[in-house]
Image: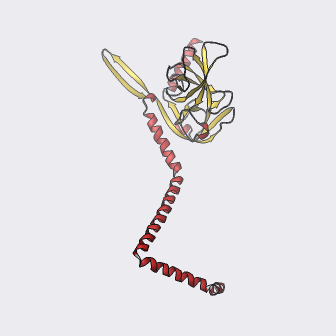
């Protein structure tokens, strides 16, 4: 307390100056309408800017919640797509009774780990067996195909990325519907894949869309990429291959969707019976 009194006594002239200056400014603004209006306008502008910055900061803090809600909404919308359903048609005499039944369901998931610079790349997502996830299910993003489920825990799953030497998905040219297989190239470029075993009858064009076929893990028509370069096989065989600019940017993956095929179990059982009958 004594030190404070000494400090005030030492600089009393400065403090008196500040008090008189502040009092004169208040009187000047209060009793002059133009200055008062200018002061209020300036104060409102400063306050408005502060509120705007505070609102931006609050919005930044809530981005995760917003993204989670959008991912859930996208999953619901995907489940309504007609390509995610199959047609059960009963024809009797002249009456056609067509009912669209749900074949594919998507579950949104957050990517919590990801690699793109290895020969065999994987992702970790925050969905597991408790969410209905099983090995072999396809995984997509808003842009296109991501990979397939390889290992499943109760709460987490490991996805074998399309950027993996063993990844191979049935694909087709969107224009001609010619079918081939999409795999990752040997150059390990995370933005480029290779479409192989396409019939020589196909006439692909640079920029043509490459999508999943009916023979894949996914609903037909999910983007894989676009043809970026045409190459004929060196052996001069009956098939073509071509480079594809991948639709998915794996370096920016945050949210993905696991595709659950509700007919997968039935298909697997029937194919197993067929294989057993041929033995």
- Quadrant of the image for the C terminus? top right
In this rendering, the answer to whether 216 lies above or below 250 is above
Q: Residue 81, percent across and down? A: 43, 32
Q: How many numbered markers are drawn?
A: 0
In this rendering, the answer to whether 172 lies above or below 115 is above
In this rendering, the answer to whether 180 lies above or below 114 is above
Q: Residue 43, percent across and down? A: 47, 68
Residue 197 vs residue 121, the one in the foreground: 197
Name which quarter of the figure residue 4 lies in. Answer: bottom right
Q: Residue at x 66, y 34 (%)?
A: 121
- Quadrant of the image for the N terminus? bottom right
Furthest-left residue in this view: 94
Q: Residue 118, percent across and down? A: 69, 34
* Image position of 40 (left or right of 181): left
* Image position of 217 (left or right of 122): left
Residue 232 vs residue 13, the one in the foreground: 13
Q: Residue 242, percent across and down? A: 61, 22
Q: Residue at x 50, y 54 (%)?
A: 59
Q: Residue at x 55, y 35 (%)?
A: 133
Scheme by which the image is coloured: secondary structure
Q: Residue at x 53, y 49 (%)?
A: 64
């Amino acid at each position: 307390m004594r030190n404070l009194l000494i400090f005030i006594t030492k600089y009393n002239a400065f403090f008196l100056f500040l008090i008189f200056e502040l009092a004169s400014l208040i009187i000047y603004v209060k009793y002059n309408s133009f200055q008062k209006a200018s002061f209020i306008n300036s104060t409102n502008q400063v306050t408005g800017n502060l509120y705007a910055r505070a609102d931006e900061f609050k919005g930044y803090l809530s981005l995760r919640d917003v993204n989670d809600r959008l991912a859930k909404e996208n999953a619901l919308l995907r489940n309504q797509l007609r390509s995610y359903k199959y047609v059960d048609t009963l024809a009797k005499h002249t009456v056609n009774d067509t009912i669209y039944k749900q074949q594919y369901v998507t579950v949104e998931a957050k990517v919590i780990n990801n690699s793109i610079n290895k020969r065999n790349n994987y992702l970790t997502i925050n969905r597991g067996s408790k969410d209905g996830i099983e090995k072999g299910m396809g995984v997509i993003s808003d842009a296109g195909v991501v990979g397939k489920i390889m290992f499943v825990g109760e709460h987490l799953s490991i996805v074998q990325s399309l950027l993996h030497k063993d990844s191979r998905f049935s694909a087709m040219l969107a224009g001609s519907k010619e079918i081939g297989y999409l795999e990752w190239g040997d150059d390990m470029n995370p933005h480029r894949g290779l479409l192989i075993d396409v019939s020589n009858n196909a006439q692909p064009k640079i920029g043509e869309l490459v999508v999943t076929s009916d023979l894949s893990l996914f609903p037909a028509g999910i983007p894989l990429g676009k043809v970026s370069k045409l190459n004929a096989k060196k052996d001069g065989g009956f098939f073509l291959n071509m480079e594809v600019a991948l639709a998915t940017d794996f370096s920016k993956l945050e949210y993905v969707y696991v595709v659950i095929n509700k007919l997968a179990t039935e298909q697997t059982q029937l194919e197993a019976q067929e294989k057993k009958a041929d033995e």
